Image (cartoon, rainbow, N blue to C red):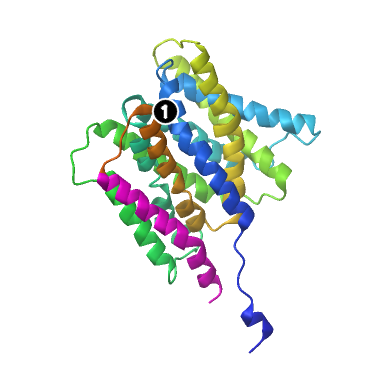
């Protein structure tokens, strides 16, 4: 037996560490956005956070004296329309009436849309113990969603699910963009935000809504969104998608809605039911199993 056959496939620790950090930043952001929407209409807020995040990253490129021109304009525009215009507007709109924790879980059906599309678009198939990780995560998601119960606000639920589909499509687009190096990744993230923010600005102007109440609370939530939940988080997300298979990055990101549910419970009083708690435990079981299952799959 060759020496190479004894080598255990390594797990991408950098990508998984980025996902762990992202779980807390994005998980709490569902509460932050819910609070911000008490002071502003959803579309102006979505435009402000997206344009602000893109400008922050473009400023980093400028200060580093890196080329500002987007490398793949058409694909970057498509990514911006999916990941920024559609995803950000739909999530903000869903949170107007939907709960922070519940909306987070519905949006994070994204991994399952990725799994359905990945075999046809990316030729990535689940094998072996990966199916057990999927079943655990899917079972947990069903318990959290409780589709057999009456949905209090069907409109918000549909918007959140649509956001998950838009995000899944953006993951597939990212996998088709040949990014080389951290600076190209930074440029891609900045430009997709700015290009995606342009339609949001138009929508914010054309769609009537309440005037923004510029309080210190709103300012704090907006700054958190621009710097952490938008600029830094989307940069990390595109880094993760570039390093992990789409199915694995999508499933592992299910930690985010768990943090969102717990944050909504802690700060907004959105107490999860026993079914939701059981669902979160199943999601965690799937997350714990997934990296091991992926390693076993690569090891043959």
User: What range is drawn magenta here?
Assistant: 274-300
In which quadrant is the N terminus drawn? bottom right
**Residue at left offset 62%, top offset 29%:** 54
Q: Which residue is mark 1?
A: 92
Image coords of residue 211 (percent x, y): 43, 10
**Residue at left offset 18%, top offset 38%:** 150
**Residue at left offset 60%, top offset 29%:** 227
Question: Quarter-wise, where is residue 3 in the image?
Answer: bottom right
Question: Quarter-wise, where is residue 79 in the image?
Answer: top right
**Residue at left offset 32%, top offset 32%:** 270
On screen, residue 45 versus residue 74, left or right, reads left
Would you say residue 136 sits in the magenta stretch? no
Image coords of residue 23 (percent x, y): 50, 43
Image coords of residue 208 (percent x, y): 39, 13
Query: Outermost residue, bottom direction?
Result: 1
Look at the numbered disc 1 and give the secondary structure of its residue.
helix
In the depicted view, which residue is nearer to us: 117 or 25?
25
């Amino acid at each position: 037996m060759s020496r190479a056959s004894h080598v255990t496939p390594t797990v991408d620790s950098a990508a998984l560490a980025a996902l762990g950090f992202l779980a807390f930043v994005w998980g709490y952001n569902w509460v932050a956005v819910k609070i911000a929407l008490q002071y502003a209409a959803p579309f102006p807020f979505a435009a402000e956070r997206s344009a602000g995040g893109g400008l922050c990253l473009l400023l980093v490129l400028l200060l580093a004296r890196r080329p500002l021109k987007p490398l793949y304009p058409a694909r970057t525009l498509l990514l911006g329309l999916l990941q920024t215009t559609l995803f950000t507007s739909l999530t903000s709109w869903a949170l107007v009436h939907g709960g922070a924790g519940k909306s987070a879980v519905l949006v994070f059906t994204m991994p399952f849309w990725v799994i359905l599309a990945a075999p046809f678009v990316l030729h990535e198939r689940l094998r072996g113990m990966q199916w057990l990780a999927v079943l655990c995560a899917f079972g947990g998601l069903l318990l959290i969603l409780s589709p057999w119960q009456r949905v209090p606000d069907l409109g918000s639920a549909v918007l959140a699910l649509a956001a998950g589909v838009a995000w899944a499509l953006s993951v597939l687009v990212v996998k088709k963009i040949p990014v080389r190096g951290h600076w190209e990744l930074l440029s891609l993230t900045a430009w997709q935000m700015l290009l995606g923010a342009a339609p949001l600005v138009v929508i914010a102007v054309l769609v009537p809504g309440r005037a923004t109440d510029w309080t210190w609370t709103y300012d704090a939530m907006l700054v958190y969104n621009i710097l952490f939940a938008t600029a830094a988080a989307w940069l990390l997300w595109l880094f993760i998608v570039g390093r992990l298979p789409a199915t694995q990055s999508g499933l592992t990101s299910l930690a985010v809605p768990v943090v969102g549910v717990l944050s909504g419970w802690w700060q907004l009083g959105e107490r999860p039911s026993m079914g939701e708690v059981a669902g979160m435990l199943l999601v965690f079981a799937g997350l714990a199993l997934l990296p091991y299952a992926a390693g076993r799959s690569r090891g043959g």
